[in-house]
Amino acid sequence: MSRIKVALTAVVAALCMITLNACGESDTPSGEPLEPTINIQEANRLVDDYMERGRRAISPDARLTDDFRKDSMACDDPTDRGPKGRVFATRDAEVAGIPNASTRENFTALRTWWKENSFRVTTDNGQAIYGEHTDNGFRMSLESNDEGKIYLGVSSPCVWPDGTPEPESPA
């Protein structure tokens, strides 16, 4: 083997080793290392906090009724591309105690609060607005229906139940 081939083989081998070592351990399809998150209790606390703050932003007189609450749901979204074993928290409730005629004003009030609190609008189709917190990935929504009712929703990003990745059991 010529010296050039030996040198080239050594360089390629070194680059492969550096690349493999830089990746770290990963259980994600994207090859990213598993990272700690907030735990599900903190996710639930923040979901409740965002629901309350969103309610107040819409109207101090508003009440949340018909609350749908899931404290821990499996994070099985195939578009997430993240590892299995994570969960998320979610809440949805009807916003009551406000006049039906003020639906547009309610959307404007929540949109203004989002801008002041690091949320960005991801979708606004006239009947619903969806937003995501730019720092922590929490999502909020406000939806209206043909009956003039509006619904506020908040969900957490996918988190590890205890805040740290679950170790894989040996196969």
Image: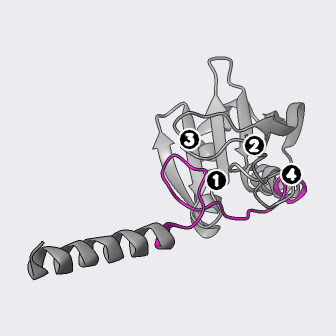
Single out the mark in the foreground, 2 or 3. 2
Task: Identify the image quadrant of residue 72.
Answer: top right
Crowd class of label 3 (few under 14; some 14 to 19; many from 20; radius 10 Å): many
User: Is 81 part of what is drawn in magenta?
Assistant: no
Mark 3, residue position:
129
**Regarding mark 3 in the picture, which secondary structure is present there?**
strand
Single out the mark in the foreground, 4 or 3. 4
Indicate the position of residue 120 as horizontal and vertical percent values. Answer: 53, 58
* Residue 109 - label: 1
How far apart are the two marked residues, 2 and 3, measured between alpha carbons? Answer: 30 Å
* Closer-to-camera residue (144/51): 51
Horizontal side of residue 160 vs 105, given as left or right:
right
Say which label, 3 or 1, has the lower sequence index: 1
Horizontal side of residue 119 vs 86, given as left or right:
left
Crowd class of label 2 (few under 14; some 14 to 19; many from 20; radius 10 Å): some
Task: Identify the image quadrant of residue 111.
Answer: bottom right
**Regarding mark 1 in the picture, which secondary structure is present there?**
helix
Single out the mark in the foreground, 1 or 2. 2
* Closer-to-camera residue (166/8): 8
Mark 4, residue position:
44
Mark 4: amino acid: Asn
Task: Determine whether label 1 and label 2 are within 8 Å by CB.
Answer: no
Mark 1: amino acid: Ala
Say which label, 2 or 3, has the lower sequence index: 2
Is residue 10 in view from this perspective?
yes
Say which label, 1 or 2, has the lower sequence index: 2
Mark 2, residue position:
85
